[in-house]
Amino acid sequence: MMNSMMSRKEYSLDQWLDWMLANHPTEIDLGLGRVGQVFTRMQLDLSYSKIVSIAGTNGKGSTTALLESIYLASGYSTLAYTSPHLLLYNERVRIDGGNAEDSLFITAFNAIDLAMGQNSERISLSYFEIGTLAALFLIAQHKPQIALLEVGLGGRLDAVNIVDADVAVITTLAVDHVDWLGDDIEQIGREKAGIARSGKPLICGELQPPASVAELSAQQGFELYQINRDYKFACQEERDCWSWGGRSATGELVEFSELPLPALPVQNAATALQVISVLGMPCDTTAIKKGLQQASAMGRLQQVNFQGTPLLLDVAHNPQSAQYLTQALQQRGLAGKIQLVLGVLGDKDCAGVIEALSPLVSHWHFVSLDVYRGQSAQQLKQYLASDEQTVSCHAGVEAALLKAVDLVGSAQRVVVAGSFVTVSQVLEIIKRDE
């Protein structure tokens, strides 16, 4: 039990995180008014860093990881801010590729607490808003040449948007977070594009963008680079390579050929290369190839082992990401060969996720998630019209994982997908058993 008399200046990182969770009345509180006031009070100088803000329904984490890997291979200093985390809060800020240490977060949280003010001047902030300000504090402190900021929810009203990005990115667009963003794809496009700034580039990696993105570009004067119009990619999978062509900030053609296929989606890699082409921090071909080969992201097509059995982990939790996972595994010849452990939060399009994944599945292992917005395995099963023998319902992730490992055949794979909660619990089980 935390000592209520204890000064927050003495808090450990875990105590700070507990306080942050309890500090604000609502988990999600979109709007820049409160967080903007505290940011202004902090007087942070971010001018040393080139800032890239990355929004999108899916692909934010992969695109961030690809950019981080390429820039590190090029010798630049980097800071990457992502969310949510899977095992440790420290994953949310990476400095030069490594998780930030507890002491750095504690220093940042103390500075933010002070800037939030006292008594009637006190400004309340959410867990995510405080975390975002901590990342910005660490940018000001460490002065990385490249700062990569993953937008949490939406775009225009997300806390990340209190800073002006040198380059803004939209990875993909789809209907998700309906309670917060609605189900109008044109409005969702407008909200995501709200992270762009007049006179600066917006790189859009969505293959079928809503008209609202181009309309906002015309209204607000940011320069839109659209995939399949301003930059393109082509895979030569028989040779395990791909090629890319795009434009520099001055409109010149930039091309790369015989690039290694990354472990992360090539579509996101193509968007990352267009960012690099316009940001003004050049990377040579050797560094780009090395960065592509080394790029990885926890929970995105992540390969691990559990009790001698290979697992593939992916946080596919909406239809668009589930379709990508299906395509990736079909290309590996795994259609109909997957023992699938699946747990999805109740506010997601569960029917759409299950429909997208169904071509892969030999046996479904539905999992009950005992968390906020969690749902039972039995509820998930209702979305599936299938033979009873191909479906198991489990009270928790570990039971599902053990059963899937027990049933997996020599030509099959165990895949864990769905919520970040599902994947993080499997990672915790693996870590415990090491």
Image (tube, grey):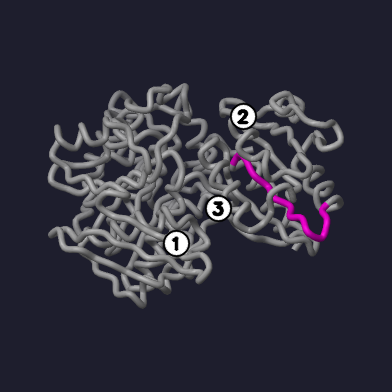
Residue 207 sits above or below residue 347 on the image: below
Question: Sequence-wise, which precedes: disc 2 or disc 3?
Answer: 3
Residue visible at 40% across and 60% down in the picture: 234
Q: Residue at x 31, y 70 (%)?
A: 76
Q: Which mark is residue 350?
A: 2
- Residue visible at 27% across and 56% down? 140
Residue 101 sits above or below residue 7 on the image:
below
Q: Give how far apart the Cα atoms at labels 2 and 3 are.
A: 19 Å
Residue at image point 28% right, 27% down: 121
Q: CA distance from mark 1 to mark 3?
A: 20 Å
Residue 383 seen by the camera: yes
**Residue 316 image position (x, y, % from top left):** 57, 43
Question: How far across and how far down the image is residue 195, in percent?
Answer: 27, 39
Q: Nearer the viewer, mark 1 or mark 2?
A: 1
Query: Which residue type carries mark 2?
Result: Cys
Q: Which residue is mark 1?
A: 235
Callout 3, which amino acid? Arg
* Residue 122 spot, x, y in % from top left: 32, 29
Q: Which residues are magenta?
A: 408-419
